[in-house]
Amino acid sequence: MTIEPGVSPPRSPGRPRSRAADEAILVAALDLLIERGMSATSIEQIARRAGVTRATVYRRFPNLTDLLVHAIEWEYQDTDPAALSWPDIPSMVRDWAGQLSEPRSRRLVRRLYGTVDDLPELLHTYHSAHGSHRGHAVRNTLERARATGQLPPHSDPETLQLVLSGAALQHLAAYPDTTEAKDIEAYFLAVLHQVGFPVTPPSSPSPRPTASRRSAQQ
Amino acid sequence: MTIEPGVSPPRSPGRPRSRAADEAILVAALDLLIERGMSATSIEQIARRAGVTRATVYRRFPNLTDLLVHAIEWEYQDTDPAALSWPDIPSMVRDWAGQLSEPRSRRLVRRLYGTVDDLPELLHTYHSAHGSHRGHAVRNTLERARATGQLPPHSDPETLQLVLSGAALQHLAAYPDTTEAKDIEAYFLAVLHQVGFPVTPPSSPSPRPTASRRSAQQ
């Protein structure tokens, strides 16, 4: 499969009805993947939900994988690597917690991780369009925090970034999608406190998984 | 769905041919789930792979979810909570790295996390049969390490256990299934070094994801 550069499927300029169909197809594909998973996401189902014919879909996308890759690029098209930067760790954590508190985004990322054995292109696309830029910005923030003494001298930004990404995955698997941003923020700060970042104990409730999803923890 | 106590489906004692069929069905179910995922795992496919009729399967298990729950309990039936204990952090890490270096086990755990939105019973069963016992033993080990000064006084065993579980999830998603146990051990030790556990830098290669799976990192 060839992933085309850019975020949009081929289109002719000045054909708004065609662009509307493009967008309806991409939205339908992502919504189906998020709600029902890969096993319920077919070209036929996507066409039906988008209100177009299968032929309309196939004229734009040669196959399901290509369509989903474009849908993921489209979802994350607003990611601007140059703008991804935080002045300090608390700002970074607040931004990350905000992202992780969006139920749709949580389900999408879980779906992408859940398809890694069958369709690794999807997680790869997510990484190229979004994750790698954020990872880079997280490492930069950690690097600066170490340089200014907010993290211990032995801190390794690359390992710490893996720790924080792992904590985010753990949160996605073990905590309910209704968790509020401030509780996710407290969760990240509790993790950062373990690596020596000075944290005032949060006044919000203890960041423990609830019983309902606690099952997902090892 | 009712999860019956114990790890085995109903059976009459002294009917070895029946037990062989039970086991063939459970193995076939797990193998299909691991290799091809939920979308390719049906009672019909399981029966075909086990070399029995669908009726034979349905006599034992009322539905697919019940069958998979029993298969997961069967897979982890050797987990003995009383025996799960490590004298210190390095022993715990060595044991965990050994588990995480088994490709079949890696794929199974990824599948269980990958089905959490559609069939949460599976991850729940894994947790009850295995994960929660290990989590408990990990927290005990961390607690003792803090008491003996191997971890800083501000360490919180509960948060640290989440950090290590998150690191394991991150490894499952971002590193190849061919990673050797000694490299996974170095990975865990690098994480533990960040939380103040004294670690001699390992002589093995730097525990970075390879290019091929690096895509999975944020």
Image (cartoon, coloured by chain):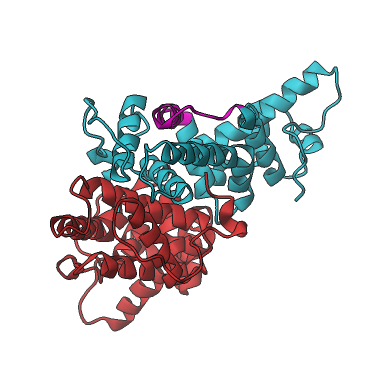
Chain colours: A red, B cyan
Report the span colored magenta.
B83-104
The residue at the point 48 percent across, 61 percent down is A207
Q: Quadrant of residue A159?
A: top left
Depth order, front residue of A113/A187:
A187
The residue at the point 27 percent across, 44 percent down is B214
Asked whether, in this view, residue B171 is left or right of residue A86, the answer is right
Depth order, front residue of A135/B158:
B158
Question: Where B71 falls versus A110 (above or below)?
Answer: above
Residue B179 seen by the camera: yes
Q: Quadrant of residue A189?
A: bottom left
Question: Where A80 falls versus B18 (above or below)?
Answer: below
Dominant SS of magenta comes to: helix
Residue B72's spot in the image, x, y percent?
A: 63, 36
Residue B83's spot in the image, x, y percent?
A: 60, 26
Residue B51 seen by the camera: no
Asked whether, in this view, residue B20 is left or right of residue B155, the answer is right
Task: Give the position of the C terminus of chain B as an image quadrant.
Answer: bottom left
Residue A4's spot in the image, x, y percent?
A: 22, 57
